[in-house]
Amino acid sequence: MQEEEQNLAARLEQLNQFTRRTHTQEEVFLFDVRLCDNEIDRDGERFSLEALEQLKDLFVGKTGIFDHNPKGENQTARIFATELAEDPLRQTTAGEVYTYLKGHAYMIRTDTNRDLIREIDGGIKKEVSISCAAASQTCSVCGSDRRKAPCAHQLGHTYSGSVCHTVLGEITDAYEWSFVAIPAQREAGVTKQFGTDSGDSGRCRQLEAQLREKNVLLSRVEELVRRDIVRLRFLTEGTTEQDAVSAAAKRMDLEELLAFQETLRTKQKQQCQAQLTPAAANHGGNKEFRM
Ligand SMILES: [Zn+2]
């Protein structure tokens, strides 16, 4: 028990290196994620042990996002420490001791992420996918570089008793990690994505991450416009939101929503003018008014 407390204190100290102010145990939610391992995945690829070592350093401080909750705020977690863990009783297909990269992550507890934390705590959100750049991709049979000098060995085929796969090495960067809805990898509920080098593919990953952030913002703006449309329709037509037009508005993209909002605004303005003009005339001809 005492050891556990010491452990926790050490972890808090580690994570507070990444926060603007010092957080207490009550303010944060700590959890571990299995980021990736050295087993051959469904794409016929595996990380070399060296690559896992490199990923171990690169993932410290990296932010994780939750794919299926794009509208939520404070739905991010951050890895504050990493370690390689082994399962000595388990051997991989390639004959190595099963080794995985464990990330220690934290979230700041807020009202908005309470449900999410409950889900993680309950083991519901277990699948993690990562994005990184691997500069080396070699054939496990002959060691040739898959991109520069393609050989005739085929992934998944057995040559002299061992299954041909691609070994990923020379990790140049790690971009992000995320919880995904679909369990994709054979074991451990881990999937990975990776760029071929720190060049185009690396930038591609970064762009993807940026795009996702943009999409989150876009969803929020769309939601705001939808709410305004409900308000304007109530003012101009006296309708509540439970009708066919509202159902249609749910499927509109931002451009259509803005056009619809503009139409309603114009309509509302006209109605106001119609109502106010006679009154304004009665008060000394002050015809100007603004919405
Ligand atoms: Zn080969």
Image: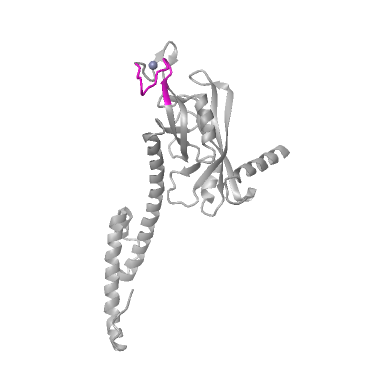
Q: Is residue 273 magenta?
A: no
Looking at the rendering, the stretch of residues picked out in magenta corresponds to: 136-151
In the rendered view, tell whether residue 46 sits above or below residue 151: below
The residue shown at (40%, 27%) is: 43
Q: Position of residue 236 (x, y in %)?
A: 30, 70
Residue furthest to the front:
199
The residue shown at (28%, 74%) is: 271
Q: Is residue 159 left or right of residue 119?
A: left
Q: Position of residue 187 (x, y in %)?
A: 49, 28
In the rendered view, tell whether residue 50 sits above or below residue 173: above
Q: Position of residue 38 (x, y in %)?
A: 50, 25
Confirm whether residue 250 shows in the render: yes
Which corner quadrant holds the C terminus? Answer: bottom left
The residue shown at (58%, 46%) is: 29
In the rendered view, tell whether residue 160 sits above or below residue 177: above
Confirm whether residue 248 shows in the render: no
Q: Position of residue 235 (x, y in %)?
A: 33, 70
Q: Is residue 122 left or right of residue 274?
A: right
Q: Nearer the viewer, residue 241 or 55?
A: 55
